[in-house]
């Protein structure tokens, strides 16, 4: 079922907005202040460790490595998966596939260190003491369940109309 498209000056004109006021403005200001505070703290800690060349080198590798891995591995892989999904998935399921890709993909990337048990040591069983794969699978299953439930509810609502 397609939705009607608005026409006229409202739909074709430029989108303009004034200053953000009220609760949204206060929230935005608090978020900006918090971000600037964290940025300042990180800069201070970086300058504090500037005497240690090894620490600065490790920080540089992490910063550059993260950007390079994102730009040359993660982003192209995500675009390739999206292109394949657009070609093979029905248009009615593409939105859900993107949601699954973003949620499960980013959660998997963030949890790779614990899923692969980097840093686990036999002499310290309290490190990585949980079944992280089961937790990861539970979140994947919950994501799929919620998306399928949403699909079902949307289908019931559409039939009632």
Image (cartoon, rainbow, N blue to C red):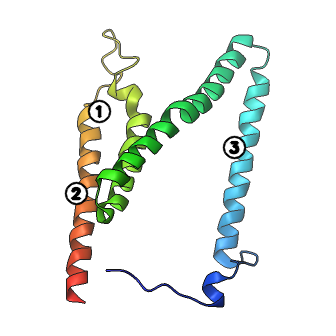
| Side of 31 where 136 appears, left or right | left
Whether residue 100 appears in this view of the structure is no
Residue behind mark 1: 132
Outermost residue toward the top? 123
> Disc number at residue 38?
3
Q: Residues under labels 1 and 3: Cα distance?
A: 29 Å
Q: Quadrant of residue 150?
A: bottom left
CB within 8 Å, label 2 to label 1: no
| Side of 48 where 131 appears, left or right | left
Along the line of sight, the residue nearer the viewer: 45 or 153: 153
Q: Is residue 132 above or below residue 80?
A: above
Q: Quadrant of residue 57?
A: top right
Locate residue 22, reporting x and y percent: 68, 78
Residue behind mark 2: 145
Q: Rate crowding at label 1 as few (under 14), some (14 to 19) or many (20 or more) other CA atoms within 10 Å.
A: some
Q: Rate crowding at label 2 as few (under 14), some (14 to 19) or many (20 or more) other CA atoms within 10 Å.
A: few
Q: Quadrant of residue 58?
A: top right
């Amino acid at each position: 079922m397609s939705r009607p498209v608005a026409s006229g000056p409202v739909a074709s004109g430029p989108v303009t907005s004034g200053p953000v006021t009220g609760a949204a403005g206060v929230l935005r200001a608090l978020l900006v202040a918090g971000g600037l505070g964290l940025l300042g703290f990180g800069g201070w800690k970086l300058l504090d460790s500037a005497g240690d060349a090894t620490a600065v080198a490790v920080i540089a590798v992490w910063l550059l490595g993260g950007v390079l891995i994102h730009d040359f591995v993660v982003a192209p892989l995500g675009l390739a998966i999206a292109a394949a999904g657009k070609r093979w998935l029905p248009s009615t399921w593409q939105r859900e596939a993107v949601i699954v890709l973003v949620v499960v993909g980013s959660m998997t990337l963030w949890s790779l260190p614990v899923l692969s048990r980097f840093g686990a040591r036999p002499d310290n069983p309290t490190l990585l003491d949980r079944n992280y794969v089961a937790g990861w699978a539970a979140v994947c299953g919950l994501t799929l369940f919620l998306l399928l439930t949403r699909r079902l509810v949307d289908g019931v609502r559409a039939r009632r109309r």
